[in-house]
Image (cartoon, rainbow, N blue to C red):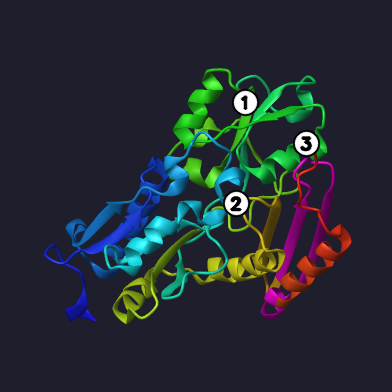
Amino acid sequence: MTQDLPDPTHPLKIGTRGSPLALAQAHETRQRLMAAWDLPEDAFEVVVITTTGDRITDRPLKEIGGKGLFTREIEQAMLVGEIDIAVHSMKDMPVLQPEGLALDCYLPREDVRDAFVCPTGRSLADMAAGTKVGTSSLRRRAQVLVAHPHLEVVEFRGNVQTRLKKLADGVAACTFLAMAGLNRLGRADVATRPLEPEEMLPAVAQGAIGIERRAEDGRVADLLEPIHDGPTAGQLVVERAFLAALDGSCETPIAGLAQVEGGTVRLRGEILRPDGSERIADDRSVPAEDGPAMAREMARDMLQQAGPGFFDWRS
């Protein structure tokens, strides 16, 4: 496809949110494409698009919608031809794409773990009753409360830099960030310590970057093929099958992690009541080719165990 490669006069337009982390992910995508095709930097144009989730920062995510909060405007720009590809944090992505778009390219997955960030301690277990823990994630909120009901969880929205400032200002005593984001920003030093999945199971697809395109754009599909990471795709197809069967959104506390080794996939899954009063967890291993079917079966079994109204907020 040499004759179809982007160049400075016809650059490939890469859509992204404008946070430092989103830009770092877009720049990583650009660097990988430059290396794969031996292209100059100006053969690509990074286009910043503000999403609903970026504009509304004074309300919890559950009050303003689901996962599409951070993707809708970007996807619309791609559908009308303003951009050619979109770079997303996969944990923000709905399990279904809008008609006309495809999501089938993933960069190598970063660290999947959550980071505990606390200037005054190394564990929630050490915190006094009533200590404020900051997070905007319903998953993290529920995980904290189910294990440490004596703590108070407060709303803590914003990008990495905003949340670190809130921590410094005393809005909360501690918070959580994704190790993947800190690593991509060169700020792994911010983490007091990473939390192993046994302590805090991560969000589905945490640490993974997905690149979305127009479904009929074969030129872009060919361009992306060399930077696609198969092992990451093998994990995400299982995790996202689990999420889809649960009808997961930003309003449902769900965690899931698939690991593939020696032809076997292990899936650990978890659903929680939003108020942290109950957790249902499962852990299964099957041959890798059976992973998505196993994930859907696990989700169905967990929902049956949970019963109706499990994800509803209790007054």
Element type at marker 3?
helix
Counting other residues with Cα less than 10 Å from the Cα at mark 3, is it few (<14), some (14-19), or many (20 or more)? Answer: many
Left or right of 153? Residue 26 is left
Quick check: 79 above or below 176?
A: below
Under mark 1, the amino acid is: Cys
For marks 2 and 1, the one nearer the N-term is: 2
Instruction: Locate residue 90, reporting x and y percent.
Output: 52, 58
Counting other residues with Cα less than 10 Å from the Cα at mark 2, is it few (<14), some (14-19), or many (20 or more)? Answer: many
For marks 3 and 2, the one nearer the N-term is: 2
For marks 3 and 1, the one nearer the N-term is: 1
Viewer-closest of 40 and 79:
79
Q: Which residue is mark 2?
A: 112
Q: Are marks 2 and 1 in contact (CB under 8 Å)?
A: no
Please state which of the two labelled residues, at mark 3 or mark 1, is closer to the viewer. 3
Please state which of the two labelled residues, at mark 3 or mark 2, is closer to the viewer. 3
Question: On residue 234, which mark appears?
Answer: none
Q: Which residue is mark 3?
A: 145
Name which residue lies at 52% across and 47% down: 180
Where residue 87 sits, quadrant-wise, is bottom left
| Quarter placement of the C terminus | top right
Under mark 2, the amino acid is: Val
Instruction: Locate residue 104, reporting x and y percent.
Output: 47, 72
Under mark 3, the amino acid is: Leu
Element type at marker 1?
loop
Question: On residue 118, which mark appears?
Answer: 1
